[in-house]
Image (cartoon, helix red, strand yellow):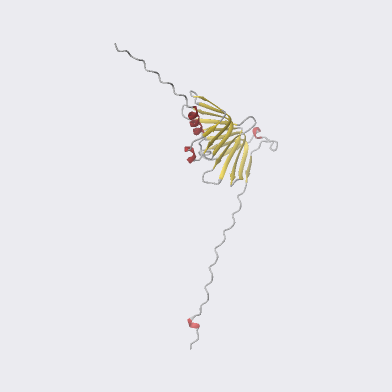
Amino acid sequence: MPTHTAPTPRPKAAPHWRAVGLALLLACLSAPALAQPSEREQPMLIEADALQHDQTGQVSVFTGNVVITQGTLLLRGQRAELRQDAQGNQSGVLQGAAGQRAFFRQQRPGLNEVLEGEALRIEYDSASGNLRLVNQAVVRRLRDGALSDQASGSLIVMNRQTERFTVDGGAAARTPDNPAGRVRALIVPRPATPPATPPAAPAAAPLQPSPQLEPRR
């Protein structure tokens, strides 16, 4: 009788923690408010002291001096938690160290402007398209390296579709110089554009003698 040899089981492939984490984070943080359209196709680099990933729950957690870069996008924090639900919607939370704020910085496409933001928590939800800066939130715009606009409050919500944002005050926005926790906005006027110099008038043509005025001989 012929003998049957049981097939040798293939070794299970090691989970690609880095690839899964990068894919989740790229989906969570590639909104127009952050990554420029051309930069969403660029590789994203994540540096952290540790990574834990739950394949079943589709959750990746980066901890310890987390630094995320993609093109001109830069994010810094102490802990980043990334999730994906059954419908494919992604969400992410970036937190700073105790008593410190998470940070993001992004070059605005086609402009010599930089958008920066800080908060104790930075949250993103792909279903709503909202980027939320929670507690001690600040967003500022730099033009040519100088501060142009700034807004602060307890909650700043930026929407990826409308490119609008709202700012709420409250107890979380209280500081020694703002005990009421009111919303504050700073708008720096653009420098006046000097009037254009009018073009110089053409030089007058030299006078020429008229034949009618020449004396007859």
Q: Position of residue 4 (x, y in %)?
A: 33, 14
In the displayed structure, does residue 77 sit left or right of residue 2? right
Q: Where's residue 133, x and y in %?
A: 58, 34
Q: Height in image: 142 above or below 100?
A: below
**In the displayed structure image, the side of residue 169 where residue 90 appears, left or right:** left
Rendered location of residue 203, percent (x, y):
54, 70
Q: Is residue 117 above or below residue 12?
A: below
Closest to the observer: 16 or 178? 16
Residue at the location (49% across, 80% down)?
Answer: 210
Q: Quadrant of residue 131?
A: top right
Front residue of 215/55: it is: 55
Please, which residue is most extreme toward the top here?
1
Quadrant for the N terminus, please: top left
Q: How many marks?
A: 0
Which of 45/112 is in front? 45
> In the picture, residue 134 is in which quadrant?
top right
**Residue placed farthest to the left in the image?**
1
Q: Position of residue 125 (x, y in %)?
A: 52, 32
